[in-house]
Image: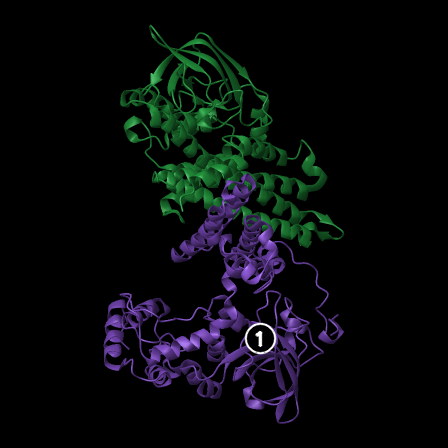
Chain colours: A purple, B green
Amino acid sequence: MSEQTEASVRTEVKAWLAEHWDSSLGLVEWRNTLADSGWGMPTWPQQWFGRNLPAALLPIVNEEFVAANAVSVARSGIRMLAAETLLEHGTDTHKERFLRRILTGEDTWCQLFSEPGSGSDLAGATTRADFDGSDWIINGQKLWTTSAHHAQYGLLLARTDWDVPKHQGLSYFVLPMQQEGIEVQQVRQMNGHASFNQVFLTDAKIEADLQVSATGNGWRVAMTTLAHERRGADGLRGANLNFSLDGSPLTGAIYDEERQEIATVQEPYRWYPQRAGRVDLAMPRAKETGRINDPVVRQELAKLLVLSKSAEWTALRARAAQQQGRPQGPEGSLGKLASSNVARAASRVHTLIAGADAMLTGSDSPLNGIIAEILVSVPATSIAGGTDEIQRNIISERVLGMEKEPRSDTGPFRDVLKNTT
Amino acid sequence: MRFSFTDEQHQFRDVVQRFLRDKSPTTEVRRLMEGEEGYDPTVWKQLSEELGLSALHIPETYGGQGFSFIELGIVMEEMGRSLLCAPYFSSTVLAATAILNSASEQQKMELLPKIAAGGCLATLAFTEPNGRWDATNAELIAAASSSGYQLDGVKSFVLDGHIADLIIVVARTPGTDGEDGLSFFAVEGEAAGLERFPLQTMDATRRQARLDFHGVQAELLGELNRGTPALLKTLDQAAVALANEMVGGAQQLLDSAVAYSQMRVQFGRTIGSFQAIKHKCADLLLEVELARSAAYYAAAAAAEDDDDLPALASLAKSAASDTYMHAAADCIQIHGGIGFTWEHDSHLWFKRAKSSEVFLGDPSYHRELLIQRWQS
């Protein structure tokens, strides 16, 4: 293969799009073309819907897709975590069976890791998988499972050996979701939204072929999934093609189909901006309401500004270090904890500004309920995706090099103290 | 670039760090704390003549090195870390910056090379016994006389005022108030009618003095009654420099706390293995990194003479003040009883943190300014 340069890749993708991109195609039809050509996931291996493109050249391809207003492969939801995990750990059969329909968006996936009894301590999962001679039989309960109610497949972490230390007794499977033995219930959160599900597994079946890790080696595979999740591969944002680069609206069936797909994925997360505290609303609200003239409000507002701007600059420092190829300093690990502090500070400021109205919700609350939604959504920030306490453990151990706490869960898992449900 | 340093800047930091590690161990800091002058003239000479630090941000035209506030921020951070006892903040940061902002071309040519070379120790006298940090605080009067101007009044909290060879004074024209009628003047340290009283500073590593002016002869710098913008700018630039210094000190305290927690054993474990201690340190690291980002960003804004400098200076100063005090309190807490002793070094930084928290305006003062100055 000839050496690829920015210019050669740009020429190649431009020519390919000019020849193949057609906004009158159906969404799945077009994405099949993308999968066949390798231009849908160009950094993937050639034999698996990719082109072996170096990651550094990917932005060129993305730029050309945007310039041509071309729709991409399906990237939203858990599906990309599934794809990346199967690419790394799956068998050829898995790749053949699942990857194409992930890219076309025909299959939706969910992630079955957390349980009622194991949140921060993911490796303490007690959902069991027992082999009956032909199938794996699954029993247990999973929690915080986005999309479980409409997913075709789930990434499942389950215990296959109870007599070894906890991390060594887990295995990793693909669970077909559309079967008897799986019951999905929505979980209503304190802010009234229901973004997640709990999944009850009662003698659910997995054919032997759908085992992804070696028996007992599931933790390592789960780490791959989580690494991609942390890297933001779960694509909650989606591409969302609404406008072309010149600002004109994009119309056509294929765009509508994609918009629908993304809207479905994003719907459960409508409250996420409020969860982060809506720092953007603080100063305008303080001015509109006249509360800006209160010295206490001014102090708290200033604290919020200091915190949020410093956190923003800290993230930019981390990115700059990365771009310069310098070892990332501690600033890289701190973002999650910083965002909790920002959210809490914003919640305080919004409460101060709202005054008595902070007791109200729905249309009686300021901004048609947005302020109330901030106040009751912020507590999620310091829990979801790793609690503040876990972040502090990680920072103190990995960045500051402090000793781990002695553990009491290193023996056979059977003997380890567990939650009783 | 506001989010990273160049290779040259990294190398520069290394040089400064090595020098300070060598010249300002805490044994030296403690020795100088006991002395009357509060600094080591030999180290000052090396710092000025070998490293050129006293000339750092002074333009080459005036005998300086011509570097920017970014490099000045690097030096301040490292000096804060090592708690260097030297008239650097007074002479290079406050006085030279004030002259750059206020004086005529001819006066700059005359005054700055001496400061740059390190032979002339200068300072800025702008605060008074009223303890206010805003530009309108000045009550000291400058009255025109046959031979120039005569100063009458009192300045206080003047950094290194007891040893300065040259004192830049902010004074008021009779009959004016508020931000009107302020001007900068230059006064010889040994001028007739000037009485200098060293103050008993809690932080013995940074000295202050009260200066009583009784008809002291002074030279007007720049134009009469036009001093306010130059003073405001000087205070913002100084706040940025101080913020960077405070970040260095806070980092030193964090390092010290972490190192001790990895060594100290209680209940059969290092205390650093207890989450009560680990989480404190993790929170402190976050706070230090945030304050550092603000200090660096503000230093870059000062270097570019950005319109946002006033807001960013207040942001960085308030962040660094809170962080430094928090780091000092936590560092002592983590050290336990030993941390409260005179022998242990933590209190040296604690006291610098306290004086820096207040100097140039405390965090509440700067948060209020931030709200007034915030544009968007």
Looking at the image, can residue B17 be seen? no
Q: Image height check: is B314 above or below A310?
A: above
Q: Residue visible at 72% across and 49% down? A: B265
Q: Is residue B61 visible?
A: yes
Name the image quarter holding residue A56.
bottom left
Note whether B300 is above or below B268 in the view shown. above
Q: Does B73 appear above or below A176?
A: above
| Residue A81 image point, x, y percent | 49, 75
Image quadrant assignment for residue A133? bottom right
Give the left or right position of residue A353, taking residue A30 as reference: right
Q: Position of residue A213 (x, y in %)?
A: 56, 81
- Quarter of the picture containing the N terminus of chain A is bottom left
Q: Position of residue B229 (x, y in %)?
A: 36, 29
Mark 1 — residue?
Answer: A145
Q: Nearer the viewer, residue B126 or B117?
A: B126
Residue A402 in the image: above or below residue B343? below
Seen from the viewer's position, the closer of residues A367 and A115 is A367
Question: Label 1's element?
Answer: loop
Farthest residue, direction top: B146
Circle 1 chain? A
Count the numbered circles shown: 1
Nearer-the-camera pick, B151 or A85: B151
Residue B44 vs residue A245: left or right? Answer: right
Q: Quadrant of the C terminus of chain A?
A: bottom right
Instruction: From the top left corner, tell me how far across and down residue B248 is, in percent.
Output: 51, 40
- The residue carrying pointer 1 sits among few (fewer than 14), some (14 to 19) or many (20 or more) residues within 10 Å by Cα, namely many
Q: Nearer the viewer, residue B255 or B89?
A: B89
Outermost residue to the bottom = A134
* Residue type at the position of mark 1: Thr
